[in-house]
Each structure stands twice: as structure tokens, then as C-alpha cells.
Amino acid sequence: MMFEEKKLDIWSESYWNQIKRNIGILSENEQEILRNKEVAILGVGGLGGPLSEQLVRIGCENLLIYDNDIFTSSNLNRQICTKEDLNKTKISVTEKLLKKINPEVHIRKFSKLDELNISKILENTSIVALTLDDPLRSIIIARECKKRNIPIIESFGIPYLWSWWFTRGSIDYENCYDFKTKNLKIQEIRKYEKDLLDIKRTILLKLLQFPGLIDIYNRKLKSMDGMLSGKLPFVTFAPISRLTASYIAFDIIFSGILKIKKMNLAPNILGYDYFRMKEIKFRIK
């Protein structure tokens, strides 16, 4: 049987011209499913920014984006900004870029997220990509997603291709990281700034279970110690961020939306170490 291109009647010519080279990897019906599903990208920095761009390029037309930050010069090494974008809000710059790719994309954007509005924010969302460097809001998001049975995909900008999902079938988000917040209300967590710094450190210590990570980050002596102490921000750069964002995008499409690929559930790690060019497979403890 000969391959035949088949534009769906509901698609505009502009949309069809954009996505027709997807067909083959995706069927027309699968493309339509992707077009309609709302994906929430919570944090549009090093991972979330490139992720949002990729999802719009492959034809997603319903995105929710959240970020409360502005672009600074330190973001130029990995995020979707230029010098012209410095001091502008990340959500406004991101929205402008996405609309240039596809003017038909529907974007719900938020610069405020807390326990009072999280339910409203996620009311139409099918999947959450958790790409925030903000432990308090990550906990708020994880609790609401658990309540609503919305799957969360997460990864970090480290030199390994991997992602994991938090669902009702996986370990709980707070338990996965051994946070001491499980029985605390959000208002109680918010009171203790030191506890939030400890949470960031706890996440980083979990990531140190990736084989060889300390050696990679200590090519500059003691940089890992600096990150653990909070004196250094998390170290990453464009190739790592873009590769990880691509991996998340692939998993959102084929695991989260189309359910063709099996979800890798937290706390299991299944991925690829591209420094050593080998598979990694273990369970975070």
C-alpha cells in the first residue's frame, strides 16, 4: 500500500505545512491527540524553555507555562533568550517565541503559583512537566497532581539522558526525595527558609547517586562542594539542557500522551550516560 498524505479537515493549511513531516513517526490521529492535549510546563528556564519550544514545533497547540523569574545574563549559556530579552519575564519572552513558531497555539501563562491558585491553574491539564528550581512550589504542584491524578514528568540538567514519572503507581514525590515535609501544611513549610535550602541540598544528594556525577562536576576542584553548600548555583550548560529537554519531550509524547512507551516510574532510573556511552539502570535510595 502506497504512503498517502492525509490532512485532517480540522487542520489549517499553516498547521499542516508545519507538522506534515511528523506523519510517519506519528499518525494523523495521533497528531490530533497531541494538538489538543494541554501540557503544563512549570518553570520555563533551562529545561522548560527548550521543552516548550519543542512541543510547539511538533504541533502541540495547548500549553500552560509558569515562571516568576526574569532572564539575566547568567541564563544566556542555556536558556531560550538573547541579550535583547534580559530583564524581561521568562513567560512573556517564551510566549512570544512560541507564537512566532505557531500563531495558533493557545498558551495559558502564570507568574504566580501557590496553594491558593494551584487547583485553578491545573484544572484542564493532562500532564505536568516539573522543571522548577523551587522546592516549595514543587511540593505544592506534586500534592495537587496527586490529588487530581495528573502524571508528573521530571528530570534534571545533568549529563545523563533520563526522566521519571510520578503517578499513583509510583512512589510519592516527597517520599522519593526523603523530604521531612510529608505531614506539614504548606504554610508551615513556608515559615522555615533553612528547611527549603535543606530540601535543595537533599535533591542534589539524591542526584549524586548517578555513577560518576561527582567526577564530572569536580573537573573544577570543589565545584560540587560549592553546589552542596549553596555557595554555587547548579552548574549546567546548553548541550546538557537541550538534550534533557528533548528526552522529556519524547517521553511526554510517547509515554504521557500516546501511551506507546512504558513510563519509567520514580524512583527507578533508566537512561544513558553519554560521557561513558553506556546504559544506566538503578533505583534511587
Image (spheres, rainbow, N blue to C red):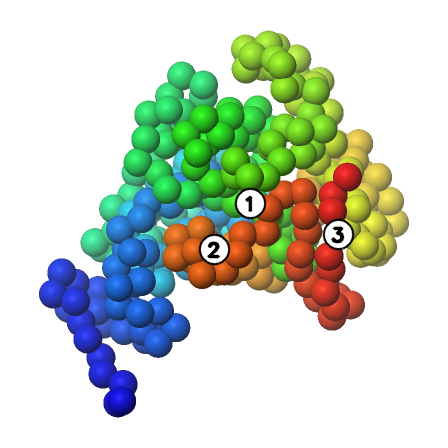
Picture quadrant where residue 25 is located: bottom left
* Pointers 1 and 2 in contact (C-beta within 8 Å): yes
Residue bearing the label numbered 1:
165
Q: Residue at x 37, y 24 (%)?
A: 119
Label annotation for residue 282: 3
**Of 128 and 131, the residue lying toward us:** 128
Q: Residue at x 83, y 50 (%)?
A: 214
- Residue 148 placement (x, y as % from top left): 41, 30
What SS does tag 3 mark?
Answer: strand
Above or below for 195 versus 72: above
Q: Between disc 3 and disc 1, whose residue precedes?
A: 1
* Pointers 2 and 3 in contact (C-beta within 8 Å): no
- Residue 222 placement (x, y as % from top left): 86, 44
Above or below for 101 versus 264: below
Label annotation for residue 255: 2
What SS does tag 2 mark?
Answer: helix
| Label 1 to label 2: alpha-carbon separation | 10 Å
* Pointers 3 and 1 in contact (C-beta within 8 Å): no
| Label 2 to label 3: alpha-carbon separation | 20 Å
How dense is the environment of label 1, judged by Cα within 10 Å: few (below 14), some, or many (20 and up)? many
Above or below for 124 versus 116: below
Which residue type does callout 1 highlight?
Trp
Q: Residue at x 79, y 45 (%)?
A: 208
